[in-house]
Amino acid sequence: MAAHTHTRPHSPATGVVARLPWWALVLPVLAFAALLTLIAVPGDAHAAGADPAAGDLLRQILRILVR
């Protein structure tokens, strides 16, 4: 025997205001600005091959996370 569930009919939401916290708008804007800056100024980018310790550190972190 199936149990009946009581559901409310969906009424259109009138007068409902969705409010976002301030950081929900600021963080994507900051991320976009940072990426745009990296694209616009490629002359400041340096190769990562100069310091092998950074690559070794990333490999160690990756090994720990994969376990």
Image: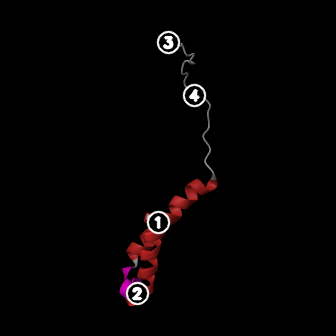
Q: Position of residue 33 (x, y in %)?
A: 48, 67
* Residue 13, numbered circle: 4
Pointer 1 or 3: first along the chain: 3
Label 3 – label 4 distance at C-alpha:
31 Å
Q: Which amino acid is tagged 3?
A: Ala
- Magenta extent: 42-49
Q: Which amino acid is tagged 4?
A: Ala
Q: Position of residue 38 (x, y in %)?
A: 42, 74
In-image side of 57 versus 25 (left or right): left
**Secondary structure beneath label 3:** loop
Where does label 3 land, which residue?
Answer: 2
Label 2 crowd bin: few (<14), some (14–19), many (20+), radius 10 Å: few
Magenta stretch: dominant secondary structure? helix
Label 1 – label 3 distance at C-alpha:
46 Å
Label 4 – label 2 distance at C-alpha:
57 Å
Q: Which amino acid is tagged 2?
A: Pro
* Residue 52, numbered circle: 2
**Secondary structure beneath label 4:** loop
Pointer 3 or 2: first along the chain: 3
Pointer 3 or 4: first along the chain: 3
The answer to whether mark 1 and mark 2 are in CB contact below 8 A is no
Circle 3 or circle 4, nearest the eye:
3
Above or below for 11 versus 28: above
